[in-house]
Image: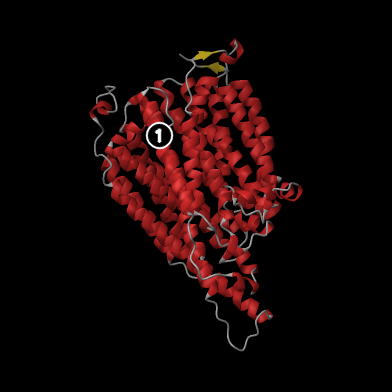
């Protein structure tokens, strides 16, 4: 039973103020999920990461996604036990601490010796990058935890009649933060650099902490267990899998255009090799996680994921769709702004505006998808979303070296609309495929799987991309009458690298489109009708 310890004055505080406070915190953390994508070229240039060693740079994005995925399914349960306000304040404090260390990463990299990490097989040629990735993980651990806690706050303050609207508002600000993040980041980077992106979080967090203390009451729940071992095993599996797939993976950035002929001598024509030991470790951790979750669920405790929900074919299908869509979405989010910054040599603001064309259409598509779900079934709504998304990526694959803004606008608008159309059928199918008591678990699981898809998509496709880029760089053959290392030679090589980067990025866009087409296969298994216990309102078990 939920027990409130709020004083009378706190109890009179309107529920809307508590909900808006929670939504503001969610918006801030969602903003930081995508704010860094338009800052990546500047960050990589400032940290002087070599063009052929950019595998670690992808972890600026992956590190945040990992922290988000690990924290999200766990912290809602933690807030049930230890109280919303307490957990909210701790999570925001962790987020602020991570933000501070993100901004201080270059200073910490120069001031603190971390060469001992070489003993664990880590490349420490760029200590500032290691600090930045670690800080992003900490930042996300706090940020990812805020989403389920905010949803729990909405559930506490609103009854069943208005709870759906409150939860919808939390979802809306989550998507809005992701939409506006790239543009927000590009504006700050263009005029003030990338570090203020993180420093600006600190005063905002301070204001939010005041409102949380003022409007969200303290509370406790009956003592129950937290599946911390399950969360740790899941996190270990994802980290090993990402490291294994992204061994030497990375992005081609604006450092490309600054690379001289000396890079040619370091390029290798050997393909990227994934780390089999890390991949094997990931499988072992995953097997242990599954065994532990089955054991925990049978003992009627609270697992991180109730694996029994995957017995429903529709839920399994929508989970696979979410995974594949996440893998495609992160390619668009990460590679479109870098393409604009490197191949077209445009400033950060242009990269943000290019991506805004895609992200702004996602909520439009989401509203249209919700309307279509009630009229042409969720199955066909999902397919109608995946098709234009694949078409959008195909059009991006056709971008020439001198692509104009009309071509960029058409392809990104189509792709963004498609991504939005898929949201409603995925969410509704996940909720309607399980019993009422499992709705929260199902919703968070599908969301987490989209994040997992982002992690794996970024790791795998960028690994292939860097391998392809290395092969192209090694194949450079200048004219015989041009002396090596001369100014003309360097200029020609720089142009060749830009052309190679263009070839790699357009190929990655095509691969993302293929992922969207593959997602149509599980989408065909989305149920036409809800199970009997959801239609009739009768609560049943999940078996």
Residue pointed to by mark 1: 443
User: Residue, x 63% and y 63% (percent of image)?
Assistant: 50
Residue 503 coordinates in the image, percent (x, y): 48, 69
Query: Left or right: where does residue 523 sit relative to residue 50?
Result: left
Label 1 secondary element: helix
Residue closest to the far front: 119
Query: Left or right: where does residue 314 sit relative to residue 399?
Result: left
Residue 225 coordinates in the image, percent (x, y): 47, 22
User: Residue, x 46% and y 57% (percent of image)?
Assistant: 461
Q: Nearer the viewer, residue 180 or 428?
A: 428
User: Residue, x 31% and y 42% (percent of image)?
Assistant: 317
> For mark 1, does the 10 Å Cα neighbourhood hold few (<14), some (14 to 19), or many (20 or more) residues?
some
Q: Quadrant of residue 485?
A: bottom right
Residue 372 coordinates in the image, percent (x, y): 32, 42
Query: Is 194 situated above or below 94?
Result: below
Q: Quadrant of residue 392?
A: bottom left
Q: Quadrant of the C terminus?
A: top left
User: Residue, x 64% and y 51% (percent of image)?
Assistant: 118
Query: Left or right: where does residue 361 sit relative to residue 45?
Result: left
Residue 54 coordinates in the image, percent (x, y): 58, 59
Tell me if residue 41 can be seen. yes
Query: Is 95 situated above or below 414?
Result: above
Query: Is 153 situated above or below 474?
Result: above
Tell me if residue 403 can be seen. no
Q: Quadrant of the N terminus?
A: top left
């Amino acid at each position: 039973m939920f027990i409130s310890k709020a004083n009378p004055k706190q109890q009179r505080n309107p529920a809307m103020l508590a909900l808006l406070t929670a939504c503001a915190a969610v918006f801030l953390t969602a903003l930081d999920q995508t704010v860094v994508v338009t800052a990546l070229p500047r960050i990589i240039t400032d940290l002087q990461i070599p063009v052929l060693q950019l595998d670690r740079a992808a972890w600026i994005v992956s590190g945040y996604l990992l922290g988000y995925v690990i924290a999200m399914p766990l912290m809602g349960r933690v807030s049930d036990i230890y109280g919303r306000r307490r957990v909210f304040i701790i999570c925001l404090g962790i987020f602020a601490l991570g933000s501070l260390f993100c901004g201080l990463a270059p200073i910490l990299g120069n001031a603190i010796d971390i060469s001992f990490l070489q003993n664990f097989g880590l490349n420490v040629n760029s200590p500032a990058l290691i600090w930045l990735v670690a800080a992003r993980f900490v930042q996300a651990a706090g940020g990812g935890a805020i989403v389920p806690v905010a949803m729990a706050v909405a559930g506490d303050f609103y009854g069943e009649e208005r709870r759906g609207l409150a939860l919808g508002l939390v979802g809306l600000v989550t998507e809005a933060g992701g939409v506006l993040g790239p543009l927000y980041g590009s504006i700050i980077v263009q005029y003030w650099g990338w570090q203020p992106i993180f420093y600006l979080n600190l005063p905002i967090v301070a204001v939010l902490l005041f409102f949380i203390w003022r409007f969200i009451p303290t509370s406790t729940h009956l003592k129950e267990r937290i599946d911390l071992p399950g969360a740790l095993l899941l996190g270990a599996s994802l980290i090993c899998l990402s490291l294994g797939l992204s061994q030497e993976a990375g992005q081609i950035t604006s450092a490309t255009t600054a690379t001289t002929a000396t890079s040619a001598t370091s390029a290798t024509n050997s393909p990227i090799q994934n780390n089999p030991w890390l991949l094997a470790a990931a499988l072992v951790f995953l097997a242990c996680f599954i065994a532990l979750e089955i054991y925990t669920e049978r003992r009627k405790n609270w697992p991180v994921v109730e694996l029994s929900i995957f017995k429903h074919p529709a839920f399994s299908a929508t989970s696979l769709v979410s995974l594949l869509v996440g893998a495609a979405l992160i390619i668009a989010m990460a590679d479109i702004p870098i393409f604009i910054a490197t191949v077209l040599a445009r400033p950060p603001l242009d990269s943000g505006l290019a991506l805004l064309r895609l992200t702004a259409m996602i909520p439009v598509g989401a509203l249209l998808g919700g309307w279509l779900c009630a009229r042409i079934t969720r199955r066909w709504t999902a397919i109608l979303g995946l098709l234009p998304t694949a078409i959008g990526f195909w059009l991006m694959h056709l971008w020439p070296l001198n692509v104009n803004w009309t071509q960029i606008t058409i392809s990104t608008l189509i792709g963004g609309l498609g991504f939005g159309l898929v949201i409603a059928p995925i969410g509704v199918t996940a909720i309607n495929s399980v019993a009422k008591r499992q709705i929260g678990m199902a919703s968070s699981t599908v969301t987490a799987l989209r994040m997992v898809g982002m992690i794996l998509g970024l790791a795998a496709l960028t690994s292939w991309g860097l391998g392809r880029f290395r092969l192209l760089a090694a194949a450079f053959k200048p004219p015989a009458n041009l002396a090596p290392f001369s100014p003309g030679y360097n200029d020609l090589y720089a142009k060749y690298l830009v052309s190679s980067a263009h070839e790699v990025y357009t190929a990655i866009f095509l691969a993302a489109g293929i992922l969207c087409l593959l997602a149509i296969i599980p989408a065909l298994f989305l149920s036409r009708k809800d199970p009997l216990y959801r239609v009739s309102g009768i609560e049943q078990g999940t078996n």
